[in-house]
Amino acid sequence: MAEIKISGGRRLRGEITVSGAKNAVLPELAALAGMNGTGVIYNCPDITDIKTSVDIIRYLGGKAELSKGTLYADLNGINSYEIPSEPGCKMRSSITFCGGLLGRFGETVFSKPGGCILGERPIDLHLYGFKALGAETEETEGLIRVKGRLKGTKINLRYPSVGATQNIIIAACYAKGQTVIENPSLEPETLDLIKFLNTCGAGIKVKNSCIYIEGERTLKSKPYCTMPDRIEAGTYLFGAAMTGGKISLRGISPTELGIVWDILRKTGCELKYGRDYISLKSIERLKAIDEIVVKPYPGFPTDLQPQLTAMLSIAKGKSIIKETVFEGRNRHISQLLKFGADIEENKGFIITGTKKLKGADVTAFDLRGGAALCMTALAAEGESRIKNADYIFRGYKNFGEKISDLGGEISIINN
Ligand code: EPZ
């Protein structure tokens, strides 16, 4: 695993371009499994998880290649419905290949997906959706088989799971008749997937917070440009705010940032925006925020909770963050304490801001937690080392280069 070395205490200054959204392009790549034709997806970030998706498409018999931020795929050769446990076990979104494979072959086989350890991460809602569409599911020796002709129906999700919503949407495109999903994920990444599928010939609408999918569609992949990554953007904005910096991000807007924009404002950052950029200036010590509840969209996104926790650890005053999405998204807390942060876990994270943080040797346990530790290292006085940095490269394109472009002093040691 690689290790990152950061010399902190400098203000971040400069401009970078936001990459395509990992959590939008992953379900879009997975949806290709049900299609024919040749696909082109622009604004595709060159990160580990995308490479894993490319490997899965090739394993299924298709062709795929990522070149200079564009994904080229030829899906005509897909001849297998079995999602390989290697590399499928490396990431959560390998399960999203099921929807397309079910539509194409009427069957799919997979082993429990991998991904960041953020708690139990069951897949019951995925299976619930497939069964509601008329498929049968069985589990033998760790392999899950889903089989059946799909028929449109009404599905009410007990929880607006992002992945389960996406999987059901994709499968429902091939079902006989209309499917309605009640209480679905309405994350921007899910809406981007819907836009992609409609570009490829699907008939999907969002109305009164429900998703309506017309069935029996033959989807043909068409060129598409994925949305910008609001989580990557928020990560660098929080990092810049922590260092008292002044940065601009190209390729993102306040609308795409949503509540993150409001939170940055509340901490006292000076924010500006134009047609295709936003800029942040952190002129004085950040203000604390009484209470933030992390929840499904349009709530504060769980994928920025570690970065927000880090940022508020140097704000003036006491903040409380309640994480309601992943019960296990707290492994960054013990590492933040090593920098001198004052955080107590008690029905949420009670953060008492400290003026200064000091460099420390810490370990990343997951993708977003790792990114939060790097942003903290940039703000802390002195040297820091972040072990298990490979987690970070799963979701941040050109991570080291972008931090250097913003004036951060970073080096990556490949062990
Ligand atoms: C997606 O994961 C994202 N991953 C995650 O980003 C993100 O944190 C998450 O959505 C929430 O926004 C991708 O898009 C590849 P969920 P997913 O299903 O689909 C429970 C990152 O850092 N649940 O909405 O796995 C689950 O346990 C990653 O980029 C069930 O109970 O998220 C969790 O508590 C991390 N049963 C909650 O729902 C199920 O069948 C949210 O999970 C599925 C989920």
Image: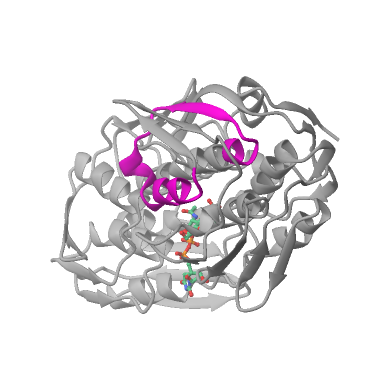
The colour mode here is: one colour
Image quarter where the N terminus lies is top right
**For this view, does 377 lie left or right of residue 25?**
right
Residue 126, how many percent across, how many down?
A: 41, 69
**For this view, does 291 lie left or right of residue 368?**
left
Q: Is residue 6 above or below residue 309?
A: above
- Res 411 visible: yes
The magenta stretch spans residue 251: yes
Residue under the image location 40 percent in, 36 percent down = 228
Q: Is residue 11 above or below residue 92?
A: above
Residue under the image location 49 percent in, 63 percent down = 109
Q: Quick one: 253 or 325, which is closer to the camera?
A: 253
**For this view, does 179 lie left or right of residue 89?**
left
The quadrant holding residue 32 is top left
Q: How many marks?
A: 0
Q: Quick one: 28 or 272, which is closer to the camera?
A: 272
Residue 132, how many percent across, how many down?
A: 29, 77
Q: Is residue 225 above or below residue 150?
A: above
- Res 86 visible: no
The magenta stretch spans residue 66: no
The quadrant holding residue 394 is top right
**For this view, does 287 lie left or right of residue 205?**
right
Residue 118, how many percent across, how many down?
A: 62, 65
Residue under the image location 58 percent in, 76 percent down = 140
Image quarter where the C terminus lies is top right
Q: Quick one: 243 or 171, which is closer to the camera?
A: 243
Q: Is residue 32 above or below residue 296?
A: above
Residue 362, how many percent across, how many down?
A: 82, 49
Q: Quick one: 394 or 313, which is closer to the camera?
A: 313
Residue range corresponding to the magenta coloring: 239-268
